[in-house]
Amino acid sequence: MTEGASTQAEQLRLRERLAKLRELPLLRGVGVSGEMARLKRQLERMAVEPSADDVWHSVELARHQDRPYTLDYVERICDDFVELHGDRALADDPAIVAGLGRMDGRTVVLVGHQKGRDIRERTHRNFGMTYPEGYRKAMRAFELADRHGFPVLTLVDTPGAYPGVTAEQHGQGGWIARCQLAMARLGVPSVACVIGEGGSGGAVAIALADRVLMQENAIYSVISPEGCAAILWRDAGEAKKAAAAFKPDAVHCLELGVVDGIVPEPEGGAHADHDGAAALLAESLGAALADVEPIAPDERRRLRRGKFRAMGMYLE
């Protein structure tokens, strides 16, 4: 059965159940009306629910080779951008871009992943997969922002943190956690936006912000569709099926409360119009900053902590 036929069958089943409930006599103490309302909401949701093809289309667009990366946006939304290099301990990680610039006339600290356009740059940038040195560089930028009172903007676009032996030997997991902690403790306003792939800990390491946004065709997930398919079905070729199951697209992430808003893209996707995509992104980042700036620093930290602790479900 195709995905579309399956959806139609499910809608028919729900409609039949709703019709039977309407025929039941009203009994005291029986929550028939509540069940009817729930079924109606479910039908309404299914009418606009993205299909498996829609979800996979978002995955493809999030990975599009012509999609704008962090430096493409920096060039268009920041003036006088000064990039920082190195972690002051070991090395510079090109997969992370960090620096200071001016946006709408005020100084901001911007941190983001950078994948690279051609094979030479992609190799140099390690395809946007960060080493511990990259997270230390990001933390250096966050500390600078907090010290001088500059808002923090982060642009997320990575398949995930680099999983190699060297990264593990350098304490990859611990530095991801420390980077999250550094963002959680910021006294200045912070806004993160997933501009392409938001993969696992490599993404959330620089996305623990007061407001988390996603571009319309971005994805945000704890694992890649291929990785999920390889675990569940021992076949990475089932990636489309996996994506349809865990729904990493912006609409579902907003529905789950993982992100706070969706940034629209130009018609055809951000890759089709870099200038238009940058204008829409700058507008959304500015609006999000304006929303959190009036909040006192201690209250901002408390709300930020509560926001992320409220995500997910805990079972004992």
Image (cartoon, rainbow, N blue to C red):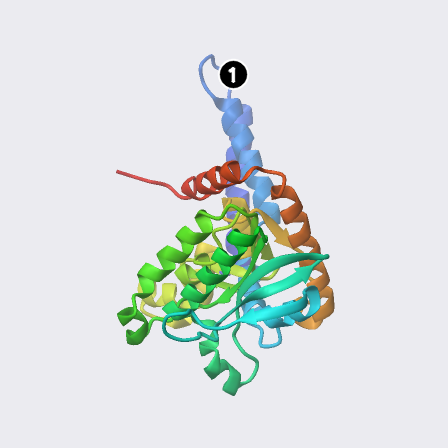
Question: Could one spot residue 69 in this view of the protein?
Answer: no
Picture residue at 41% right of the left edge, 64% below the top: 136
Give residue 70's position: percent from left, percent from top. 58, 68
Give residue 82's position: percent from left, percent from top. 60, 70
Image quarter hosting the C terminus: top left
Give residue 214's position: percent from left, percent from top. 58, 56
Count every numbered label the image shows and give the total: 1
Give residue 13's position: percent from left, percent from top. 50, 42
Amino acid, disc 1: Leu
Dividing the picture into quarters, in which one does residue 145 lie? Answer: bottom right
SS at badge 1: loop
**Rendered position, 124 above or below 172:** below
Q: Is residue 170 left or right of residue 114?
A: left
Picture residue at 47% right of the left edge, 37% below the top: 302
**Of 200 and 139, which appears nearest the observer?**
139
**Of 204 and 111, which appears nearest the observer?**
111
Picture residue at 61% right of the left edge, 48% below the top: 48
**Rendered position, 260 above or below 169:** above
Reading the image, the residue beneath label 1 is 26
